[in-house]
Amino acid sequence: MRTNRVSSMEVERKILSLLHGHKTRKKLPEIHAHFLRQGLHQSNQILSHFVSVCGHLNRMEHANRVFCQTQNPNILLFNSMIKGYSRNGPYEESLSLFYLMKNRGIWSDEYTFAPLLKACSSLGDVRLGQRVHGEIVRVGFESFSAVGIGIVELYCSCGRMEDAKKVFDEMSDRDVIIWNLMIRGFCNLGNVDTGLHLFRQMSERNIVSWNSMISCLAQNRKDSEALALFHEMLEQGFKLDEATIVTVLPICSRLGAVDVGDWIHSYAESIGLHQNVVSVGNALVDYHSKRGNLETAIKLFNEMPFRNVISWNSMILGLAFNGKGELGLEFFKEMTDKGESPNDATYLAVLTCCSHAGLVDKGQELFALMSENGHVDLKLEHYGCMVDLLARSGHVRMAYDLIRSMPFRPSATLWGTLLSSCRTHGDVELAELAAKELINLEPLNSGNYVLLSNIYAEEGKWDEVEKVRVLMRIKSVKKAPGQSAMG
């Protein structure tokens, strides 16, 4: 009897070792077959580990098949299933399993609720989350760290910062993760001052805290404050990670902080991040492209051992904005030849190449390809690029027809693009129409009335000029300082 028990334990240890090995993904079906042969298909310990591994590998269909064949799943197995679905979805399955567990009379433990809360956060369902929160309070698990983090994350992700703050204030032990969640939650709602105030109150910060606050400032157009905080971070002895680099380089581009950007480049090279982390390589390509330093950008791009679609998009768009549209199209061809699938941002970049290089035929060909293949959804930005290309090249009537055929409501930017080109190419009739459309879209923008008035004045239509002025008075529109209407 003792020999059989030892033998069984050895088999279980071997299976567990296989489950957590390096080649688990490829051998998952073999491992499953192995413990079936050993008669361990009802062992909750083995099954909970198996399901946990399935969750990490996004193989929940396999996990569910195993679970459904289990006669008496225990709390370990239920928790593994709930966690797996909370990671990979469908998130509703986590909640369904929780209610099934309750119906079977199985008591929850502290490991049940954190993934349940994560599932509610991913669903964005605050009411469902509140019910789970109520259950947590009823069974007395709110003091567990992972559960507290889950509750705060739920309310932050759903924009319920008053609820999040109430939970936060009641916590006796707030770790850095909780502080980071609160800061990000306030900043995501645009309340950066409160986020910064919380950041200043932290007794302990990690690199995530700094990255998060710098990113929040940048996203709210506070680039100078973001860069100052970055310098403060360095002064306090924190080292940059990939997230810092990806966050701060665009700030350097917008502020023209070349010395800081170049130092970050040197730092990334010194620790190998520029080649080991794709997002860092992409950020450097984008930074140097925006600086106009195409030689360095192309060199960095070519030296990247791994590239993704963002790498190609950054390079192609960088070439477009530096007047190298034709070279950008060559990169696009290389990209597709190498089997990389373009996305909507790629097509926006190549259309921008065509627009900046005046390549009307190529632009129309690509636009038609996008419309026909169905792999990419045409967005307003794609139409805008095409309108810009046609209008810049003097095909203002074609640009107007494209605006009228769009499945979207034309934006003021589109009509403004058309108006500018109509005036450049002498199509007064269409310019007048575009100006009227601008007034309809932005009735309180005095600049639109001034544009229309100037169009009439250039044609000597003084009665129409006066009508525009009367219309401005009726709508109580006042000219901005520095604007003037002819006549």
Image: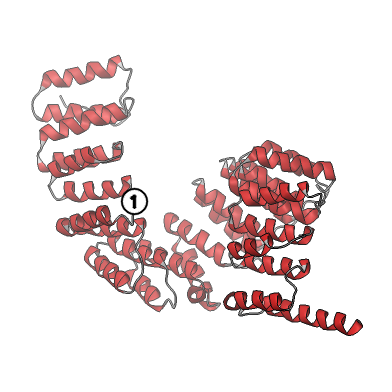
Which of the 4 image quarters holds residue 31? bottom right
Asked if 117 appears above or below 264 in the picture, the reply is above
Left or right for 223, reference 16:
left
Q: Report whether residue 102 is seen.
A: yes
Closer to us: 100 or 199: 100
| Residue occupying the point 42% across, 68% down | 308
Image position, residue 318 (x, y; %): 33, 63
Closer to us: 273 or 138: 138
Image position, residue 271 (x, y; %): 56, 77
| Residue occupying the point 36% across, 63% down | 313
Instruction: Report the residue that reaches farthest toward the right.
Output: 2
Closer to us: 441 or 406: 406
Image position, residue 1 (x, y; %): 91, 81
Q: Label 1 belongs to which residue?
A: 377
Image position, residue 317 (x, y; %): 32, 61
Q: Secondary structure at mark 1?
A: loop
- The type of residue carrying mark 1 is Asp
